[in-house]
Amino acid sequence: MGCSTADVASAVRAMAAVVVAHRDELVDLDRVIGDGDHGENLKRGFDFVVSALDTSEVDSPAAVLKLVAKTLISKVGGASGPLLGTAFLRAASGLEEVDGASVAAALRAALDGVVARGKAEVGDKTMVDALLPAVEAAEAVKDRSVAEVLQAAASAAETGAESTIPLVARKGRASYLGERSAGHLDPGARSTSLLLRSLADTASASAS
């Protein structure tokens, strides 16, 4: 089953609500190994995204994602805005028809954009630790429905995020802490898993 422009816009609004619900958790995670602003930056960014959706005419799923990308890049401080914005921008490319295969391809494009921009790899204790396994899981079931592809991606992202706990950060602010960064969940990996879980839940609800 494909998804309409309205479906994708609704999914983005649901992501915004999840960011609001988990703002404090993300702030607390980032306070331990970062600047403490990840949750608030994301919330502010998605508040702007919702406002942009309310006041803009978007005519395709790709246009929705491009609007999200432009808003996050221009409105979110720190590394989160450019990285997430790049992810949404790359995901939008070629996403005219939304099916399982195109969603998997969009996730791969998003990952490639994040890696190109942030130069991180698995094991660096970043959002890539959640996003790469999500992409691989999505690609493994890309011939299935959008909901099934996103459920696979979300589950893998959650496992990937948890895998950051024992890691020593090699990128970003957390890397300044050295060994002291070990033992803590990476906030970027956690927010990535939250966003993918939100997308999966929205898609599953639409399919039922």
Image: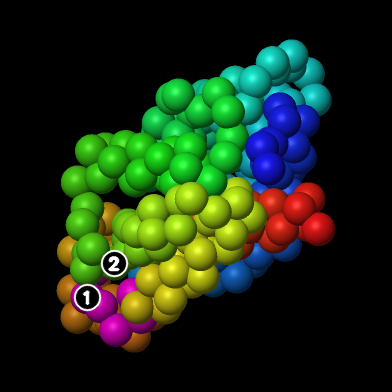
* Residue drawn where x is 46% and y is 51% of the image: 142
CA gap, disc 1 to disc 2? 7 Å
User: Residue extending furthest front?
Assistant: 143
Q: Quadrant for residue 7, please give it.
A: top right
Residue 99 in percent (x, y) is at 57, 40
Q: Callout 1: 10 Å neighbours few (<14), some, many (20+)?
A: many
User: Which residue type carries mark 2?
Assistant: Lys
User: Which residue type carries mark 1?
Assistant: Val
Residue 33 in percent (x, y) is at 36, 70
* Residue drawn where x is 39% and y is 59% of the image: 140
Q: Which mark is residue 168?
A: 1
Instruction: Please say whether residue 78 is visible from this viewpoint.
Output: no
In the image, 133 versus 143, the foreground residue is 143
Q: Is residue 89 left or right of residue 149?
A: left
CB of mark 1 within 8 Å of CB of mark 2? yes
Q: Is residue 35 magenta?
A: no
In the image, 83 versus 202, the foreground residue is 202
Residue 167 in percent (x, y) is at 25, 78
Q: Callout 2: 10 Å neighbours few (<14), some, many (20+)?
A: many
Magenta-highlighted residues? 164-169
Q: Which mark is residue 125?
A: 2
Q: Quadrant for residue 194, please give it.
A: bottom right
* Residue drawn where x is 29% and y is 41% of the image: 112
Q: Quadrant for residue 58, please give it.
A: top right
Up/down of 189 relative to 97, above or below: below
Residue 3 in percent (x, y) is at 69, 36
* Residue drawn where x is 19% and y is 80% of the image: 179
